[in-house]
């Protein structure tokens, strides 16, 4: 078995990733080595490389948590996957199974969780390690490049839409139509919701229309809360924020209908002002939502396998990763970029 792999490594925060040889760990119990075929590039990888969040990864590390590849070696013991299977990695790389959150079915909130491409090396490389209890099984016949974004962007917005408790026929605003948001538009549509998309770029809004949004708002030109209130005659039932600017979070609150739910998926560093009076008087629910559990992942992949969602993906190589990050910062990516190995 190979002992090294070629990875894109964050050596230091806020410096370009370095393509170099990295030691490949020997798989332990419940672990497997996967030879990568493709990996999506998530905005979280950019936050990781910048050390944007209060809890930081420790350089050097290999980002990437939308990896798809073939199992080539299993650690000792029994596994739920076999050599030759096509599996992925995910942000929820593993959870402990024993804490109060895991025991009550909220493994995404496990304080002992490992995160792919953050606390454990990820999919920006030719090989990666996965936990075979958590590695998503990729549906038969899936295009590896196309399915990759489901593993983070897809499952995250699918779960976010679920916890919004918005029903078929009700209005759902998707704020931010990037990698997450362009899939959120499709999941919301497939779940029977009436979709409104908000972004600050017209090309993103065009993509949202293509994927089923019935109304779009460019938040650079008009007050998006006013536009949503007017179109929905009283506000949207659900709002899912995937945007990478804190301003979108404050604006979301004013888009809500009475008793509406606002779900935050986006994770830009920073804060926003929240109107206490409106939140109380309108009985609003504001909740954060972090990726999805293993069953959410199965369901999110099933939407893809049944043709209900189709990621917009542009192919790149591992060597392109710094260029992709630059484009991502400027908001110049349509849907997702994915590396083909
Ligand atoms: P992306 O760069 O592909 O998309 C971001 C989008 O936000 C772009 O379309 C951009 O035009 C839009 N935007 C920027 N400012 C805006 C504004 N003021 N109003 C409306 N839209 C605005 O990023 P992505 O990969 O989709 O990730 C989005 C965010 O979600 C990141 O912060 C990422 O870390 C986070 N994320 C969270 C989870 C989770 O589990 N909660 C999972 C994955 C990603
Ligand atoms: Zn992600
Ligand atoms: Zn746990």
Image (cartoon, grey):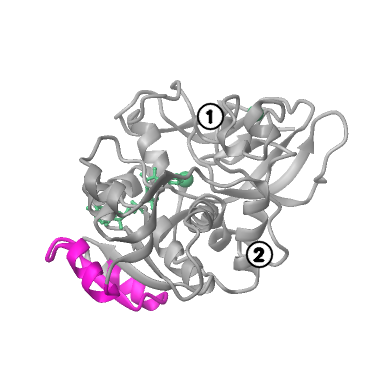
In magenta segment, residue 205: yes
Q: Residue shown at 24%/68% (left/top)?
A: 229
Foreground disc of the pair 2, 1? 2
Question: Does residue 132 sit above or below 174 in this rendering?
Answer: above
Q: Secondary structure at mark 1?
A: strand
**Which of marks 1 and 2 precedes in the sequence?**
1
- Measure the C-alpha gap from mark 2 to mark 1: 36 Å
Q: Residue shown at 64%/73% (left/top)?
A: 306
Classify residue 275 as left or right of residue 69: left
Mark 1 and ligand 2: say if the CB distance to the nearest ligand atom is below 8 Å.
no
Question: Does residue 78 sit above or below 202 in this rendering?
Answer: above
Percent position of residue 131, x then y: 70, 35
Report whether residue 177 is seen. Answer: no
Classify residue 170 as left or right of residue 35: left
Judge by depth and name the residue closer to the eye, 163 or 84.
Answer: 163
Percent position of residue 339, x then y: 49, 52
Q: Residue shown at 78%/37% (left/top)?
A: 73
Question: Does residue 54 sit above or below 44 in this rendering?
Answer: above
Question: Does residue 170 sit above or below 51 in this rendering?
Answer: below
Image quarter of residue 173: bottom left
Q: Please give the residue where the numbered disc 1 appears in the rendered image.
A: 21
Q: Residue furthest front?
A: 281
Q: Please give the residue where the numbered disc 2 appears in the rendered image.
A: 302
């Amino acid at each position: 078995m190979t002992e090294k792999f070629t990875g894109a490594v964050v050596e230091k925060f806020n410096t370009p990733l370095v393509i170099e040889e990295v030691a490949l760990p020997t798989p332990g119990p419940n672990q497997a080595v996967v030879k990568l075929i493709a990996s999506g590039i998530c905005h979280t990888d950019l936050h990781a490389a910048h050390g944007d969040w209060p809890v930081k990864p420790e350089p050097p590390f290999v980002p990437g948590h939308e990896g798809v590849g073939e199992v080539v070696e299993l650690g000792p013991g029994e596994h739920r996957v076999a050599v030759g299977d096509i599996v992925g990695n995910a942000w929820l790389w593993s959870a402990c199974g024993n804490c109060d959150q895991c025991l009550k079915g909220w493994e995404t909130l496990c304080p002992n969780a490992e995160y792919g491409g953050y606390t454990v090396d990820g999919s920006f490389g030719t090989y990666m390690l996965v936990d075979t209890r958590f590695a998503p099984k990729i549906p038969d016949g899936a295009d590896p490049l196309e399915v990759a974004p489901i593993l983070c962007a897809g499952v995250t917005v699918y779960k976010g839409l679920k916890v919004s408790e918005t029903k078929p026929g009700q209005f759902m605003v998707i704020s931010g139509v990037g990698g997450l948001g362009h899939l959120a538009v499709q999941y919301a549509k497939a779940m029977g919701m009436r979709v409104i998309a908000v972004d600050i770029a017209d090309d993103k809004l065009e993509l949202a229309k293509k994927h089923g949004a019935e109304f779009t708002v460019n938040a650079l030109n008009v007050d998006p809360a006013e536009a949503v209130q007017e179109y929905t005659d009283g506000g949207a039932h659900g709002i899912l924020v995937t945007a990478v600017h804190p301003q979108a979070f404050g604006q979301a609150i004013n888009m809500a209908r009475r008793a509406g739910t606002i779900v935050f998926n986006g994770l830009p560093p920073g804060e926003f002002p929240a109107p206490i009076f409106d939140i109380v008087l309108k009985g609003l629910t504001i909740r954060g939502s972090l990726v999805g559990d293993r069953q959410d992942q199965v369901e999110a992949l099933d939407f893809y396998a049944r043709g209900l969602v189709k990621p917009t993906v542009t192919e790149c190589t591992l060597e392109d990763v710094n260029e992709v990050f630059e484009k991502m910062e400027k908001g110049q990516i349509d849907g997702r970029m994915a590396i083909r190995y």
